[in-house]
Image (tube, helix red, strand yellow):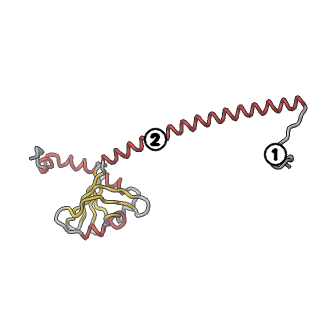
Amino acid sequence: MSNRPPCGAVEDAFKELFGELCDGSIALAAGVFDEAGNGIYFNRGMRLMLDGINAGTVGGDAFVNPTFAALRELTHAGAVFSGVLTLGDGLRIHRSLAARVWQRDERLLVAGEMDVLELDRLNQVLISANREINALQRELFKQNRLLQESEARLSASEERLKLAVDAAGIGVWDFAATRRHRPA
């Protein structure tokens, strides 16, 4: 037995606040679509999910898996779909939600959320990759500095050799040992 109060009691007491929270939420993506797939209502989370995707006629274009047409054909009582819903433009942008879809009065209500644990795991992977990149950048900077120091020492050594050769009045030439003659 749950100690939670019935949802209706909470909804009545906080109905306006729930509406504001839903409208501004980025953790919850909610949208209502007409039978042609046109968006009737998108909360902030759904707008972010559809960002970069043609949101004019979203149903036909943005529902990758399952397709909007497939969702429209489902006619169960209650939720017609529960699972991973992928939205995208079919080419490069794809975003997935753990979603549920309901159908009422020729409209579809889509509500989904991001998997927060998976996002946290991916964030940890990114943090680790950033640390590795930073370490590689530091090593590259160190090696670049050593190379510049070596080039400066080589340049100074070449200058000293040139001065010594000029002072001694001797010549220097390249010799290609494999061809046994001076290069042209």
Q: Residue at x 30, y 50 (%)?
A: 115
- Measuring from the top left, give residue 71's x and y in whole percent: 27, 67
- Residue at horizontal 38 percent and vertical 60 percent from the top: 88
Indicate the position of residue 77 as horizontal and vertical percent values.
16, 65
Mark 1 is surrounded, within 10 Å at the Cα level, by few (under 14), some (14 to 19) or many (20 or more) other residues, namely few
| Percent of width and height locating residue 89 | 40, 62
Q: Quadrant of residue 159?
A: top right
SS under mark 2? helix
Mark 1 residue type: Ala
Which numbered mark, 1 or 2, is in the foreground of this view?
1
Horizontally, residue 29 falls left or right of residue 75, namely right
Of residue 43 and residue 4, the one placed in the foreground of this image is 4
Marks 1/2 in contact by CB < 8 Å: the verdict is: no
Labelled disc at residue 69: none
Residue on which the image places disc 1:
177
The residue labelled by disc 2 is 130
Instruction: Tell me residue 67's x, y (percent).
Output: 32, 66
- Relative to 118, residue 95 above or below: below
Rendered view: 80 above or below 6: below
Give the residue furthest to the left: 1
Amino acid under label 2?
Asn
Q: Measure how far apart labels 1 and 2 are at the Cα level.
A: 49 Å
Query: Residue at 20% across / 61% down in the picture?
Result: 79
180, 108: nearer the viewer: 180
